[in-house]
Image (cartoon, rainbow, N blue to C red):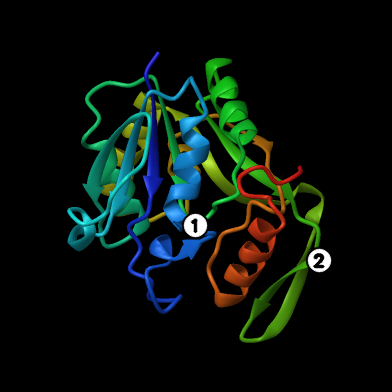
């Protein structure tokens, strides 16, 4: 079975102020943390590392698995499509943001196992813990019932043919989603959730980076408790 990971490290760092995928965390670039975890998973056969086009040649990758480097696009969705277009055949495709360095082996394996069971997709998620309100023009319009609300993370795992079809349909319709599962959902795909962790956060701000450094400083490099 061919299982491919698309590891997204193609951001321009517009919100962060610099390309965060290259920021050093305990001496390693951020994207390498995810590669280290992926390398431990026997089921994964190939990795596509999506990078800014201008960084393709200079970035060195340390991996025991076959790694292909691909140029990213304008949006996250474009970057995933660029990677998908290079895959001729596969059974399962996993999409992961390199800005989430604390995703565990278990999260990847749970997604793989769910798709093997027949689901079109499996996405890492945690229940919403805080009260969530809908706000319009800074005025609260209503409070959402958090009982059925989840915070979605990556990795997100899919049948290759389903994800490919979902992306084709999205581009035909000029649809831009905020994650890969939203594209699969809109073509009727059956997507299940697998257990995430509050420590599997996305490094988006300088404060997030401070927290990440605290975690690795305590030895929690790739296996935070869940």
Left or right of 74? Residue 143 is right
The location of residue 62, given as percent across then percent down, is 36, 41
Residue 186 in view in this figure: no
The label number, if any, that marks residue 99 in the structure image: 1
List the residue tagged with mark 2.
131
**Element class at badge 1:** loop
Q: Give the quadrant of the N terminus.
A: top left
For the point 54% across and 53% down, the residue is: 100
What is the CA distance from the residue labelled 2 to the residue labelled 1?
25 Å
For the point 29% across and 54% down, the residue is: 51
The label number, if any, that marks residue 35 in the structure image: none
Q: Is residue 64 above or below residue 96?
A: above
**Element class at badge 2:** loop
Identify the image quadrant of residue 21.
bottom left
Residue 161 in view in this figure: yes
Nearer the viewer's eye, disc 2 or disc 1? 1
Q: Residues within 10 Å of mark 1 (few under 14, many from 20)?
A: many
Left or right of 37? Residue 147 is right
């Amino acid at each position: 079975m061919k299982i491919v990971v698309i590891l997204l490290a193609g951001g321009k760092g517009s919100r962060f102020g610099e390309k965060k995928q290259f920021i050093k965390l305990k001496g390693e670039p951020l994207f390498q943390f995810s590669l280290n975890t992926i390398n431990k998973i026997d089921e994964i056969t190939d990795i596509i590392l999506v990078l800014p086009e201008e960084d393709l040649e200079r970035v060195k990758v340390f991996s025991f698995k076959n790694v292909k480097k691909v140029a990213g696009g304008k949006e996250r969705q474009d970057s995933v499509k660029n990677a998908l277009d290079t895959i001729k055949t596969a059974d399962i495709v996993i999409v992961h943001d390199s800005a989430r360095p604390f995703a565990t082996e278990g999260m990847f394996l749970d997604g793989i196992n769910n798709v093997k069971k027949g689901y079109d997709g499996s996405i890492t998620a945690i229940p919403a813990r805080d009260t969530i309100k809908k706000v319009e023009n800074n005025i609260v319009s209503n409070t959402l019932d958090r009982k059925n609300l989840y915070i979605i993370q990556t990795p997100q795992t899919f049948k290759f043919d389903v994800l490919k079809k979902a992306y084709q349909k999205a581009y035909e319709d000029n649809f831009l989603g905020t994650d890969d599962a939203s594209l699969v959902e809109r073509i009727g795909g059956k997507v299940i959730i697998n257990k995430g962790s509050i420590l599997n956060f996305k490094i988006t701000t300088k404060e997030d980076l401070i927290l990440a450094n605290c975690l690795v400083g305590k030895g929690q490099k790739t296996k935070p408790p869940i």
